[in-house]
Image (cartoon, rainbow, N blue to C red):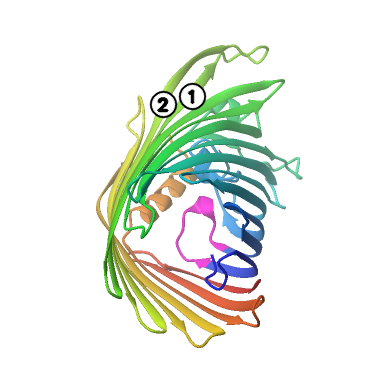
């Protein structure tokens, strides 16, 4: 929230960004450009009531996408629709969020609702079109103890849907459409008989926290979540062909120490996520398909442990912040009853520096710079069976493994200048730059420009 008003804050901004890549995951594309419009508002009402809201619209293009005909790859992986041809995609995203909280003497209760709708499509064969909706509802409460601490609990339910279809303008030349099931595997029957997919499912999440509410010097929290995502295809009727079950947890802890104008903090965050994928088998009879069995065939696990050390120094007209980061990441992926697997262990080292300078009563300058390095200490994989996998599939999997198992250096810079016009209205302009260089591959870079008003 803004620091010029203790009662309310609103801003509206327009963002233009462009991203160029030399080496990249083929499913994510090699170049991106687009714009976004965003508005946020927070208002402190009377009698301990607060409301907030956010609306956003994004319009962007991604070029040279391959082996991905869906949107929301991270949600549905590995059960996407894929083909070997490269194509450009156009995307539109609409987002809305609103929340309300009511404070009593010792209890705070609140709720938040968000909705995101996304559309992605291509204008050349195989002409994919995907639409998705993501609806979330949060409810929570906190209780102030007699000592200066509070405990909180919250719950979230999320409903997700995606509808994807493929259409060819040419009736002569059609590429093969694959209903992927992980690594180089695909559903051989439905890949050649269906060019659509429906994804649907729910996520349930609960969490809690314990924190010091006066100076925010101590915080401990946890969250656990469970998701089931179903994939169905349509022939004469709908057939469920895959199910993805995801379970995750997160643990967080932070402690801060104040010494006059100095503030020192330590943070720890541990996350774990496991995905279990099930293939659903049917009788191979074109006249009538009968479900035979379900079998667990895919497993994915990622563990992240992150440590932060923060230092802040407050001066008369400026604030300097330094953040040292170390993160350990372990990823494993495998197929049951198959030799296919992937294992990667990576170490992330980083330093983030921020400088906030109050030029005068109307102007403020904020600058942030960061440097990170990823060092892969272990990487091993068998991505396909050599004598049976198509060359195009092998090339895709080899390329992506080189990217995810490569060391890199990453540098980011962000500059924002605020000008307060009067007691109500202000304006700002900002620029961001991101440079990522792979040790054995090429370099990627992106930039964005932001202009907006506050009121």
Numbered disc 1: secondary structure: strand
User: Residue 35: percent from the left, percent from the top?
Assistant: 65, 65
Residue 22 shown in magenta: yes
Q: Which mark is residue 257?
A: none
User: Residue 144: percent from the left, percent from the top?
Assistant: 41, 45
Q: Quadrant of residue 58?
A: bottom right
Q: Quadrant of residue 422?
A: bottom right
Q: Is residue 35 left or right of residue 360?
A: right
Mark 2 surroundings: few (<14), some (14-19) or many (≥20) residues within 10 A: some
> 35 above or below 109?
below
The residue at the point 51 percent across, 27 percent down is 243
The residue at the point 33 percent across, 53 percent down is 405
Q: Which residues are magenta?
A: 20-31
Determine the residue located farthest toward the left in the rendered image: 377
Residue 138 shown in magenta: no
**Res. 21 in view:** yes
Residue that numbered label 1 is attached to: 279
User: Residue 313: percent from the left, percent from the top?
Assistant: 32, 76
Mark 1 surroundings: few (<14), some (14-19) or many (≥20) residues within 10 A: some
Tell me the quarter of the image containing the N terminus.
bottom right
User: Residue 384: percent from the left, percent from the top?
Assistant: 39, 38
Q: Is residue 249 left or right of residue 430?
A: left
Q: Which mark is residue 297?
A: 2
Circles 2 and 1, Cβ within 8 Å, touching? The answer is yes
């Amino acid at each position: 929230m803004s620091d010029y008003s203790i009662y309310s804050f609103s801003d509206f901004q327009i963002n233009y960004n462009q991203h160029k890549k030399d080496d990249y995951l083929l499913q994510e594309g090699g170049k991106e450009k687009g714009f976004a419009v965003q508005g946020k508002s927070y208002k402190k009402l009377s009698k301990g009531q607060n409301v907030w809201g956010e609306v956003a619209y994004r319009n962007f293009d991604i070029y040279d996408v391959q082996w991905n005909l869906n949107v929301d790859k991270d949600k549905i992986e590995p059960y996407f629709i894929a083909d070997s041809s490269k194509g450009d995609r156009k995307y539109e995203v609409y987002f809305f969020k609103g929340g309300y909280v009511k404070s009593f003497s010792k209890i705070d209760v609140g709720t938040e609702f968000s909705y995101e709708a996304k559309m992605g499509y291509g204008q050349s064969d195989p002409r994919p079109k995907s639409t998705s909706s993501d609806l979330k509802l949060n409810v929570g409460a906190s209780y102030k103890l007699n000592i200066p601490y509070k405990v909180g609990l919250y719950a979230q339910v999320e409903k997700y849907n995606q509808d994807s279809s493929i259409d060819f303008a040419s009736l002569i030349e059609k590429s093969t459409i694959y209903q992927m099931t992980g690594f180089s595997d695909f559903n051989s029957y439905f890949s050649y008989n269906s060019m659509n997919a429906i994804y649907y499912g729910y996520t349930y999440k609960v969490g809690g926290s314990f924190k010091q509410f006066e100076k925010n010097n101590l915080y401990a929290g946890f969250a656990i979540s469970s998701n089931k995502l179903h994939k169905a295809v349509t022939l004469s009727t709908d057939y469920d062909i895959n199910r993805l079950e995801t379970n995750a947890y997160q643990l967080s802890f932070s402690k801060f120490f104040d010494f006059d104008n100095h503030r020192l903090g330590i943070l720890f965050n541990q996350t774990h996520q496991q995905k279990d994928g099930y293939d659903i088998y049917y009788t191979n009879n074109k006249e009538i398909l009968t479900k035979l069995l379900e079998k667990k065939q895919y497993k994915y696990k990622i563990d992240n442990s992150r440590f932060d050390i923060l230092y802040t120094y407050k001066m008369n007209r400026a604030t300097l912040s330094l953040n040292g980061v170390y993160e350990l990441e372990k990823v494993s992926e495998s197929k049951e009853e198959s030799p296919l697997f992937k294992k990667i262990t990576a170490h992330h080292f980083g330093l983030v520096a921020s400088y906030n300078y109050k030029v005068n009563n109307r102007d403020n300058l904020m600058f942030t710079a960061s440097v990170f390095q990823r060092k892969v200490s272990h990487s091993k994989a068998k991505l396909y069976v050599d004598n049976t996998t198509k060359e195009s599939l092998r090339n895709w999997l080899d390329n992506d493994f080189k990217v995810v198992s490569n060391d890199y250096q990453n540098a980011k810079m962000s500059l924002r200048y605020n000008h307060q016009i009067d007691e109500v209205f202000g304006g700002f302009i900002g620029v961001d730059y991101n440079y990522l260089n792979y040790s054995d591959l090429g370099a990627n870079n992106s930039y964005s420009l932001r202009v907006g008003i506050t009121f």
